[in-house]
Image (tube, helix red, strand yellow):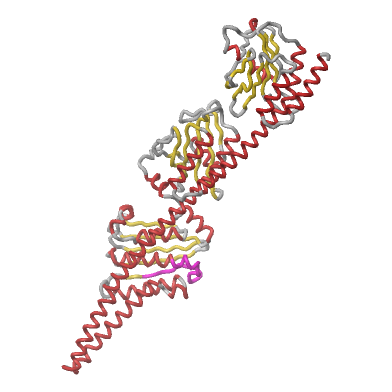
Amino acid sequence: MGRERKDLVALYNIAVAVGSSLSLKEVIWRLYKEATRSIDPANFAIVIYDEHKDKLIFYLVYDQFKPVKPFALKHSSNQGLISQVLNTKEPHLINDLSRTTDQFEINRMHPNKPARSWLGVPFFNANLSGENAQGVIAIWSYKSHAYSERDMWFLSEIATQAAIAIRNANLFEASQRRILEMSVVNDVARTLSSTLELEEVLHRIMDQVEEMLNVSAGFLLLKDPTTEDLLFQIGLGQTKNIDYFRIPKGKGVAGHVAVTGKPMHVEKKEHPIDFHAQNLLCVPLILHNQVIGVLEVLNKKEGHFSQNDLELLASIASFAAIAIENARLHESVLDERDRVIEAEEVARKALARDLHDGPVQLVSSLSMRLNFCQRLIKESPNLLVKELPTAMQLADRAVHQMRTMLFELRPLALEVDGLESALKTFIDRQQHDISEKQPRLTLSIETDNPQGHLTRQDTKVETALFAIVQEAVTNAIKHAQSSYVQVQLRETTTALYATIADDGLGFNVDEMMDTYSQRGSLGLINIKERTELIGGDLAIRSVSGKGTKIRIFVPKAQQERLKKRGQSGVLSNSKRVQTAILSKSLNGTKH
């Protein structure tokens, strides 16, 4: 059989052999087995290029019939012949390496006995548009002029046939990796959803990131809802023990990602990076179309970050955002439960105190007066006429105070007639109750509404506003030592406004809010939290000796209230974020 026919048969056998498998390892082994039926197998190498890692993987190498352990070289920094063939996508035939400056990678292993002839061709099929070379097949000899143009043609045909098989095997393995990654992402979702403790959630997120992406460092930042700065929460690797830091809105890669909501892949050669990073990925944490933070990883330990890495990190981030929000909500529910328990305890104590100081005292006095009247019936009936009116007055006062307390606990007028009527009734009752002890204190209520009366609002809004005004007026009566307390109600087309003002002692607002727990009073905190829960804004202005003004603004539109509640209410952020905001270590460290 002539060489030409022999070569064609060999090419057919190679095409059949390599085209029947999707395993890269098997394709390479079959290629070697079939090719060396026609090519001297003494010195033979199949090199595959891993584009994601920028590595030349010397997958199968025989030198002087001896197998060489697989090894890898970085393609971008390699100046050898393999990289030249890969870059040019053209065959290279060198008859005498001693007469050139070109370096053959295998010669580095045998500097005392270098190869003389070298032939290398790329795994490349020109019929596939936009295709890069998949790798290189190379043969060499320790004699000069060992190969001909015919050898180069034959080896090129082998490589062209194998290029498609290697490409398909790479695609198949990539799809298998993708399936594995999706399986891992599902595991991430299960892992993150198995706890509601925020601290544990954050640690699990970073453990998964480190394991799946093989990076040197990384960190997770959450957005301060007030300033929109990014606050450090947790790090991994080289940033694991870093102190808290704050990244101003829009600054650095993380700040840019938080503002745009788009992921970034940055290489140092293209863009300056802090933290001594050579490369990084940064993806946003998005919940309900809002960026709540970012997840950033630095310095892939092997090679460069790929598009798959970016997509994988983005998938982790999407689950992480949900897990963080669930943990936040869990913490908020627990905090709210504790606040409810505390508020109930305070309310019970206040009710007991008010009953003791008011109706109980009056009923006790009434009981003593009735006992006295009972004795008068027997001893001096004529004096009974003078004592009965006093007893009646005590009874009337006791009944009035108990009705006032019942009204404050559940104002039926609020349900029937609305906020304006209920507050007027409340002010009238309070004025009556303080008339003896504080005769100089005047309580008043004004409404400034073009329609004449306030329109009915959502029941929760009216109930909360009533409780807020009630708390503010009661506090002023007890502590302000003022000559007047005035309530003003105003309605516009979009909002309700309530203002409670007095000319009393005044107080330091910041100090009062910071030390309320030591004072045994939750008045201002109750007002603040009730305002936030209905999506309102609260402003308190107080000057020592010049009185206090409390102003509440509540949007009428439910959507606007829900939006404001999400920004400022008890469900808006976690203890950790609040602590980070207040932490003294947040000194503006640059990204």
Asked if the stretch drawn in magenta spans residue 446, the answer is: yes
Left or right? Give the position of 48 relative to 409. Answer: right
In which quarter of the view is residue 414 placed? bottom left
Left or right? Give the position of 69 relative to 390. Answer: right
In which quarter of the view is residue 283 placed? top right
The relative height of residue 212 versus residue 532 in the rendered view (above or below) is above
Residue 534 x, y percent position in the rendering? 46, 61
The relative height of residue 402 versus residue 7 in the rendered view (above or below) is below
Asked if the stretch drawn in magenta spans residue 22, the answer is: no
The relative height of residue 255 versus residue 44 in the rendered view (above or below) is below
Q: Nearer the viewer, residue 225 or 140?
A: 140
Q: Nearer the viewer, residue 183 or 269?
A: 183
The range drawn in magenta is 444-463
Inspect this view and state whether residue 228 appears.
no
Inspect this view and state whether residue 10 appears.
yes
Residue 46 x, y percent position in the rendering? 66, 21
For the image shown, how many numbered marks are present on the structure?
Answer: 0
Residue 549 x, y percent position in the rendering? 36, 60
Pick the quarter of the image with the N terminus: top right
Q: Nearer the viewer, residue 389 or 143?
A: 143
Residue 396 x, y percent position in the rendering? 30, 82
What residue lies at 47% left-to-right and 38% top-to-bottom? 219
